[in-house]
Image: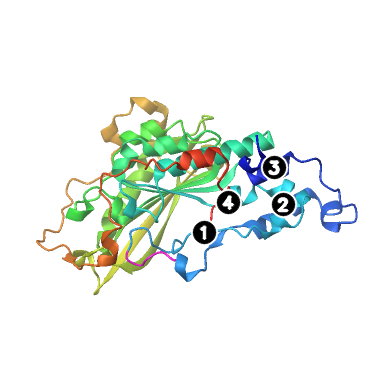
Amino acid sequence: MASSSVALHQRILAKASPDPQMTSLLLQKLPAEIRYEIFSYALTDYPDPDPDRAYGTSTLYTRPSYLAPRKSDTALLQTCRAIYLECWFLPFILREQVHWVVGNQHRAPPGYRFHEQLAKLTFSLHTIRAQQQRDFEIDRLHIFAQMFMIEGGQLHKLLTTPELRPRVITLTIRHADWWFWENDEPLRFEGEWIKRVSGSVPSSAGEIRIELESLERKKSQVDEIARQMKDKWSFRRTDGEILFAAESAVSRWRGTSRWGQQRWVRDETSEGIIDYYIVTVVFRPDAVLQRRRFEVSATAREYAERSMMVESDQLKLHNPEWSRIATDTPFLHEPQPELESEQESEQDITPRPDGWLDRLRRGRFSLWGS
């Protein structure tokens, strides 16, 4: 095979042993564990500061900490082959792996398509595993998901990706991800998907965080959904360990009410502004909670023991007495011609056949992203 058809990192790794650099204090005096900490600090990702790369303000995916794509400064890897061999994979495992499990493309950053990114993730994990010849973990996996995609099995598909071993898994349900949010339907979270996901959570997961976001005026609904979640839900890892709800935290943020060509006046707290309310429920391994003498919900423990015997309705989070706001004008139409060409069908969840996978297989991609 011609060298030009082999990925650069593969050509570097295939060469003979590097110069030992016997006079290098960094490589000869510092323990590998300390070098790892130094290299990790240098290779940790950060938001791209280029203004041209910033996300638009009127999008569903722009939010605190997600204002632009993240990037890694890989200049360290260009210093010498010894350092490259030691930490070439760090930009990938340190980067928060973010996936938007959504039904149409304008709910995710430009160019993101779930099926393509899942294929790229699989390839990257396999490449590192094959080179390292041992299991490895990534720091963080963050999933933004619509309800119908979760219930349709896409979350399970992502979590069962071969070689995927995240230490922390975060699942965020945004205001516009809840069922029929456009009609201001009361919040609800079905439970059938829990049984499908349970048992497929990687054994590396020491923490699962579920972020429940809605409007400030729906604070009581979010609080109740979180309360029921802590009382009923648990997650079983592939090694049999069960994660139970340990604590919850409240946060808030303020964002635009304009998405695409619509301004959602029904949900505004002031002109052009929506106030969001979020409760994050944190699940931790039972063994950890027992050491802390934390009292787990008796209902959650019972349901975990019964596992597949639990009825889906018992895991459902809702309150049938909640009602919605009925209005004839939930939003105003505010045309933005520059966005019209970017809008895609709500049903467009099929990856485009643009030869992307062929380029990936030939090694013409970066493990480190942009």
Q: Is residue 84 left or right of residue 225?
A: right
Q: Is residue 136 in view?
A: no
User: Which residue is tagged 4?
Assistant: 368
Give the label on residue 11, or none.
3
Tag 1's secondary structure? strand
Q: Is residue 106 in view?
A: yes
User: Picture coordinates of residue 230 (x, y %)?
Assistant: 38, 45
Q: How many marks?
A: 4
Q: Which residues are magenta?
A: 54-58
Tag 3's secondary structure? helix
Sequence-wise, the earlier of marks 4 and 1 is 1
Three-letter code for the amino acid on which mark 4 is drawn: Trp
User: Picture coordinates of residue 145 (x, y %)?
Assistant: 36, 47
User: Which residue is tagged 2?
Assistant: 36
What is the CA distance from the residue labelled 1 to the residue labelled 2? Answer: 21 Å
Q: Quadrant of the N terminus?
A: top right
Q: Residue at x 90, y 52 (%)?
A: 22
Q: Residue at x 52, y 38 (%)?
A: 122
User: Picture coordinates of residue 289 (x, y %)?
Assistant: 53, 42
Circle 2/circle 4 CB separation < 8 Å: no
User: Which residue is tagged 1?
Assistant: 70
Sequence-wise, the earlier of marks 1 and 2 is 2
Q: Quadrant of residue 276?
A: bottom left
Residue 356 vs residue 312, the one in the foreground: 356
Residue 321 vs residue 260, the one in the foreground: 260
Residue 353 in magenta? no
- Farthest residue to the front: give it: 2
Tag 2's secondary structure? helix
Magenta part, dominant SS: loop
Q: Is residue 333 left or right of residue 34?
A: left
Q: Residue at x 77, y 54 (%)?
A: 80
